[in-house]
Image (cartoon, rainbow, N blue to C red):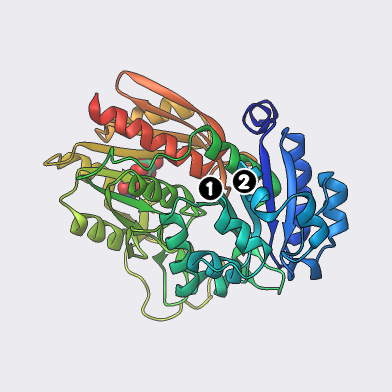
Amino acid sequence: MAKESESHLKGRHVLLCVGGGIAAYKALELVRRLRDAGAEVQVAMTAGAQHFVTPLSFQALSGSPTRTSLWDSAAEASMGHIELARWADRIVIAPATADLLAKLANGFADDLVTTLCLATTAPISIAPAMNHRMWLHPATQANLATLRGRGVQVIGPEDGPLAEGESGPGRLSEPEDIVAGLLAANAATPATDNALKGLKVVVSAGPTYEDLDPVRYLGNRSSGKMGFAVAASARRRGAEVVLVAGPVHLPTPAGVKRVDVRSAAQMHEAVFAAFPADIYIGAAAVADYTPRAPAANKIKKSNESLALDLVRTPDILAEVAAQTQGLKLVVGFAAETENVAGYARGKLVAKRLDLIVANRVGVADGGFESDQNAMTAFWQDGERVFAPGPKTRLADELVDLIVERLDA
Ligand code: C5P
């Protein structure tokens, strides 16, 4: 990763804008990581950010005076704010607060950071961080959609514990992931062409929950992140996208039609209701078994052991692949703990798929709950190994491969 980072950020002018949130302390580490990758960094802070971290800390790490105000005549005399906006090859806003997103989406320029963002022609990347309810609020999501529509890169946020003792989506991405996101953006600015225009893509994502009784269920550790990233990527390539999502707390990608489901049976119904389609991507971790008859009331503990009577669920992917009518490409996923290639190729044939994407689960830093992944795609007479990295980048690369396989 370090080598790659050097090649893409070396000598680049990165203007880091720091917003006012507790995650501002992580932006200090980000400055170091950016400089380690060879970038020249200047920092601008909002007034709010200065309540959390001092300009001096950023100055010490960036090696340049930190900019804090539009009205600082000494700073303006050495490099005016328009000049600074022009100096930047890329602007990174981390942490980006809900307030900053709202201002940027609406073109405000009432302080230094917003003015810089309006005055620049450089690409902008934002790493949001905020309370999960603020993140999920329709106002914030609408602002994000506006910004994404203008080509702004959004990195994170992560799902997890938040400063206020709550948990949910809203944690600032780790500095190394922000750098990885910038590299991905620099290396291959995510394609926003129309390679999939006119095509309908149905994506399944996330786990399924199979109810045992009114309070308990059988579930799995799928986060849905990969499927959501693939849906977002296909949408950026011009496809009409329906995302059938199991129970996850992830924001809906811009422009994607989302159908929420809970069980394998519901997912089966929703997927087939979304057809006809041109491409099916089965990224969901569908339960293979479901209780034969969920109990109407809470199961009471009595005996020393309890046997569950489970029956097979429909194999959605195999059924989709069997009804090839109209479908141009069917893509499955295989999460394996061993013999990844062998099992994946077996499924490719058994389920009659066009493409299967395999990854190893049960290893550190990859698989189900992680934002990172390492995967290999197999098709009848070929395979492609994807370099390990963030799921968002892998999703873009997988959609590249899907576009290639459509033409093959
Ligand atoms: O055979 P296995 O469950 O490992 O295959 C995984 C692939 O099959 C995934 O793409 C998953 O979405 C799909 N699948 C399905 N319906 C099931 C089980 C798995 O669509 N009941």
Q: Earlier in the sequence, mark 2 or mark 1?
A: 2
Q: Nearer the viewer, residue 404 or 249?
A: 404
Quadrant of res 388: top right
Say whether marks 2 and 1 touch (CB < 8 Å): yes
Residue 93 in picture, x, y percent from top left: 63, 55
Circle 2 sits on which residue?
86
Find residue 31 and name its label.
Answer: none
- Is disc 2 placed on a helix, strand or loop? helix
Q: Is residue 156 left or right of residue 377?
A: right
- The number of callouts visible is 2
Residue 12 in picture, x, y percent from top left: 66, 35
Task: Answer whether residue 347 is visible to the viewer in this image.
Answer: no
Residue at left offset 50%, top offset 70%? 140
Residue at left offset 42%, top offset 74%? 213
Q: Is residue 259 left or right of residue 1?
A: left
Circle 1 sits on which residue?
121
